[in-house]
């Protein structure tokens, strides 16, 4: 049986974190983490307690360090810093945002460096081995929809990054905490009252943000790929009537290219993977304001096109 | 596309060919055909008729009149449609005039 983060006693977790010897299995990636920020060590088990832990010397795809910069900022308005392979790709953020900083930074690592996959900016959930992709710009409502569907029993593959294997055309799960912000937070609290959240960070560049813990079952099934079956381009619009309308295959194809972070790097393999996907899936546009109604409509779509 | 095309793109006497060694990949996607150009890394969505012209010019160079003979019924009434398509494909860098 695989050891998980929550199997580690608190003192060993802190020690491993301080030494940079904490290797987490997050989807297909090994992530070696280092941090001496006490609060980060407290939050991590909240969101990643059920993730597998590998031996300290195991190979890691990403070596990430969340620490505090030296100097005056250590004491005055303290900050956190994200480091990846000893580089500092971002400006520091307030110390209270260390946990979301890790989430955003890991997104960046995957989008920039996981070149063996076609990485598409989309939430992905699955039912019975068939995946629903929800591509969308920030604010389109994809994370809210993703959280709603997961609360209704869909398997979480990813909240933010769809990993397509170009040679097989399937989707590899990267189940991670679901990022929620501002108005979507009370919506999900009402919709799924038993959900577990990470820290609530106010005054971020995106407003209030928090992360919803990924379901244990989704993490345990992270090794099981799914076939793309539906692509739905969501658009949250306050007060709008629910509308699920056809999306022509060529439009879906174009939308997926625009949402793919590394399409140019993938060359013809990426082109064929998206052409296959565009031909394989049922594509729709979804305009919604009521989460429950949107989830029900998508489930009906899944049944209609089973 | 610019409205005013250079004379070469409007001439009936020009013989066109597909630009050699581009490494073009064509895939039908819905009602369109997706074209991937390995050399530039560009992806285009073109009509089925434009894709058929690309295929035809891969086999052998041709003039607009020859291509027009194979036009789908919807395009046969519009004598300028082939010229416009050739101009567009030329702007995309997929075809080129054959030197006389």
Image: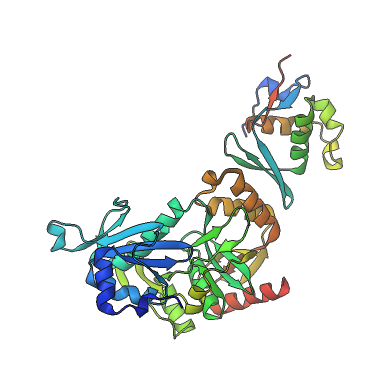
Residue occupying the point 44% across, 85% down: A193
**In the picture, residue A256 is in which quadrant?**
bottom right
Viewer-closest of A161 and A245:
A161
Judged from this view, the residue extending furthest toward the bottom is A194
How has the structure been colored for display?
rainbow
User: Residue B58: where, in percent of width, then height?
Assistant: 75, 31
Name above or below for residue B71 compared with residue A212.
Answer: above
Residue occupying the point 84% across, 40% down: B72
Viewer-closest of B77 and A190:
A190
**In the picture, residue B55 is in which quadrant?**
top right
On the picture, is A201 further left or further right than A128?
left
Judged from this view, the residue extending furthest toward the top is B100
Name above or below for residue A301 compared with residue A82.
Answer: below
Number of callouts = 0
User: Residue B29: where, in percent of width, then height?
Assistant: 71, 51
**Does the image show residue A206?**
no
Residue occupying the point 47% across, 53% down: A114
On the picture, is B53 further left or further right than A51?
right
On the picture, is A263 further left or further right than A100?
right
Residue occupying the point 73% across, 34% down: B85
User: Residue A14: where, in percent of width, then height?
Assistant: 25, 72
Viewer-closest of B4 and A117:
A117
**Does the image show residue A287?**
yes
- The image quadrant where one finds the C terminus of chain A is bottom right
User: Residue A149: where, in percent of width, then height?
Assistant: 55, 76
Name above or below for residue A5 compared with residue A267.
Answer: below
On the picture, is B98 further left or further right than A84?
right
């Amino acid at each position: 049986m695989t050891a998980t983060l929550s199997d580690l006693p608190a003192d060993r977790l802190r020690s491993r974190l301080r030494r940079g010897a904490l290797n987490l299995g997050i989807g297909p990636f090994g992530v070696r983490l280092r941090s001496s920020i006490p609060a980060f060590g407290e939050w991590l088990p909240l969101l990643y307690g059920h993730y597998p832990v590998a031996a300290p010397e195991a190979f890691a795809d990403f070596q990430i360090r969340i620490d505090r910069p030296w100097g005056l900022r250590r004491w005055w308005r303290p900050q956190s810093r994200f480091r990846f392979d000893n580089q500092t790709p971002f400006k520091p953020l307030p110390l209270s945002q260390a946990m979301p900083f890790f989430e955003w930074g890991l997104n960046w690592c995957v989008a920039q460096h996981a070149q063996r996959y076609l990485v598409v900016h989309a939430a992905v959930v699955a039912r019975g081995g068939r995946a629903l992709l929800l591509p969308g710009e920030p604010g389109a409502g994809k994370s809210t929809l993703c959280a709603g569907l997961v609360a209704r029993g869909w398997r979480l593959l990813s909240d933010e990054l769809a990993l397509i294997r170009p040679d097989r055309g399937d989707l590899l799960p990267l189940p991670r905490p679901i990022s929620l912000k501002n108005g979507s937070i009370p919506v999900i609290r009402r919709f799924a009252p038993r959900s577990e959240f990470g820290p609530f960070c106010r005054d971020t560049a995106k407003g209030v943000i928090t992360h919803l813990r990924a379901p244990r079952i989704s993490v345990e099934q992270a090794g099981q790929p799914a076939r793309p079956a539906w692509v739905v381009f969501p658009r949250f619009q306050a007060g709008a009537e629910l509308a699920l309308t056809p999306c022509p295959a060529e439009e879906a194809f174009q939308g997926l290219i625009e949402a793919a972070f590394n399409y140019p790097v993938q060359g013809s393999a990426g082109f064929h993977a998206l052409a296959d996907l565009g031909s394989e899936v049922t594509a729709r546009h979804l305009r919604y304001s009521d989460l429950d109604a949107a989830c029900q409509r998508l489930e009906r779509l899944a049944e209609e096109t089973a | 596309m610019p409205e005013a095309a250079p004379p070469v793109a409007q001439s009936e006497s020009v013989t066109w060919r597909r630009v050699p060694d581009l490494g073009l990949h064509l895939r039908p996607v819905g009602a369109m055909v997706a074209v991937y150009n390995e050399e530039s890394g560009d992806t285009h969505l073109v009509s089925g008729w434009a894709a058929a012209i690309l295929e035809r010019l891969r086999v052998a160079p041709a003039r607009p009149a020859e291509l027009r003979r194979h036009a789908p019924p919807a395009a046969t009434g519009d004598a300028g449609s082939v010229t416009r398509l050739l101009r567009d494909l030329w702007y995309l860098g997929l075809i080129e005039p054959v030197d006389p």
